[in-house]
Image (spheres, grey):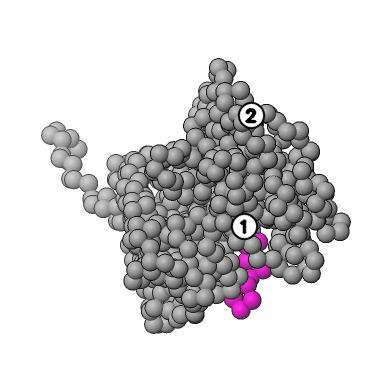
Amino acid sequence: MAARRPSPGRNLVIFFLAMAVLYGLTALSQASPDEGETAWKPALGLDLQGGTRITLTTEEAPSSENLEEARRIIDQRVNGSGVAEAAVTTQGGNNIVVEVPGKGGDRDQLEETVKRQAQLRFRLVACSDATPGPCASAGGGLPGELSGLGRAPLDLSAAADEEPTDGASDAASDTATDAPATDAPVTEVPTDGASEPAEGEPGTPTEADPAGNGEKWTVEDDIAWSRQPDQASIAEFAKYTCDPKGQLLNAEDGKLAEIEDDPDKSLVACLLPDKEQPTMKFLLSRSVIEGTELDDASAGTPQNGVGWEVGIEMGNDKDRARPKGSPGAADDFEKVSRAFRGTEEQFAVVLDGVVLTYPRMTAVITDGRSSISGNFTEQSSLDLANSLKFGALPIAFDDEQTSVEEIGPSLAGNQLKAGLTALVVGLALVMLYCLIYYRGLGLVVVSSLFVAASITYAMVLLLSETAGFTLTLPGIAGLIIAVGVTADSFIIFFERIRDEMREGKSMRVAVETGWARARVTRVAANTVQLLSAFILYVFATGAVKGFGFALGLTTLIDLAVLFWFTKPMVSWLGHFKFFNSGHRMSGLSKETLGTDAPPPARSAIAGGNA
């Protein structure tokens, strides 16, 4: 059976349909530009546009290690992808300066993210509006029609300690659910004694003396308290209510309540509401695990499953954030999971006194690794993972000394104009040279460069809206370099075609054989350039990271244009007599190829008819 011949026309149609889809997505992202901004205009970086400078001052003099750790976490919050070009630096021994490009819209949200102290804590749920339990007689639920609403709890699971079945030992398969549960009976702690109170202890723990023997809190005390909170805490729970925005209000006068998020005390908090989940009030235990003890958090799809989940990993460093010799976070997490597994009891993830999620345990978590599953979307799982991963700061900031000011561009306004001018001039010179040297084939170069520029422009706009990408002067330099890279691809391909035609092959045959050789060279060269861009993006910081991103993006676009536009275009032109017959202006004539020299004179044959 004969091999299927390539169809350049079909390939070109598919390529332009893909471009149409790209521009459709870009148009959707530009449908509601921020007030004062021009649609179809890329976001500019600090060096070209300026932005907002936020100076944070610590409450106490921190260690250099804690200050650097806080700087790193804030940098990951505002510039986690590395393309927003936000600058986060330390100043002196107690200041962190954050410079965020742009004004308004998402930039305002970034400003709030930076100023937020963001202390992340894990607490046990004693009661809530959905499951009042021992707080049922206290009242103080949600206002009006919101009372009693809620979704099913999320599930938290991890590697089970029983004998594993197929796949049971994989910690990544553990799951947790986040939804309000029905009233659950008081559940006994497993008989291994890990969480059982000691004999002779009084039955009702209090905040001042949880075990009745004057000793400090343990996770076993937290579990016991969550099942039978003291009356003072229940009365405190009744004093507050939550408004639809998730703000805690005084039940008597409806004014905003101010409650300190003290890790050593119980807490009344509201659930952060979203489109599917209204707010809800919780009575929570003291902090069982601090956010600084969380090693990692990530969003993903479960193995052999559908939907989204959030994987978390607890550390077990007994010397970190705890008195020496005390259990680590993973040990405490295991004790909670043993006590709560198979019950409707829940633990809450609290960020700055606001409940982010409240899963229930479905397995014993022995190594600190688990996953939270439930009715997640991709965005909600990413939001929760980011809050968990970048939520906790090792230091606190003084709100009164926080300053916010607008700053101008660090470069003069003509720098942007000069950079764009250099880009346009570079494109024009490359096009002019290719038209003179390659003649008819030069039209392919011009059209390919226009197509590459169009795709780059659309991608920059789309990434500006979806990934916070900002265009800086180093980024423009990366785009300018891409012009030469793209032109180099054409030159290699065209010269291969000419070499094949010098050997006597027709243009249509020369295009296919020349392409087979040229593509190997181009893929190898672009792979090296992609590796360079990747190294710059991963290991560099600031503007250099943006340069690496722009260089890598344009290199990928160069490969796409070469494979799915330039090659099909040249194959399609080979069907026209103007090119395959070697017209003088086609760029493939004998004169151009250097094969128009007269043949050597033939010798006369002796005895012939001379």
Q: Amino acid at mark 1?
A: Gly
Q: Which residues are magenta?
A: 27-39
Residue nearest the viewer, comparing 245 with 35? 245
Image height of 437 relative to 610, above or below: below
Choose top left, top right, bottom left or bottom right for residue 592: bottom left
Q: Residue at x 62, y 49 (%)?
A: 207
- Residue 580: image location, x then y, percent: 43, 49
Q: Is residue 182 visible?
A: yes
Q: Earlier in the sequence, mark 1 or mark 2?
A: 2
Q: Quadrant of the C terminus?
A: top left
Q: Residues within 10 Å of mark 1 (few under 14, many from 20)?
A: many
Q: Residue at x 64, y 54 (%)?
A: 267
Choose top left, top right, bottom left or bottom right for residue 420: bottom left
- Residue 38: image location, x then y, percent: 59, 75
Image height of 239 relative to 574, above or below: below
Q: Look at the magenta stretch and give its main secondary structure.
A: loop
Q: Is residue 100 magenta?
A: no
Q: Residue at x 62, y 38 (%)?
A: 223
Q: Is residue 377 visible?
A: no
Q: Is residue 32 magenta?
A: yes
- The answer to whether 437 appears left or right of 82 in the picture is left
Q: For the residue labelled by badge 1, is the local secondary structure a helix, a strand or a loop?
A: loop
Residue nearest the viewer, comparing 261 with 596? 261
Residue picked out by circle 2: 189
Residue picked out by circle 1: 353
Q: CA distance from mark 1 to mark 2?
A: 28 Å
- The answer to whether 224 appears left or right of 184 in the picture is left
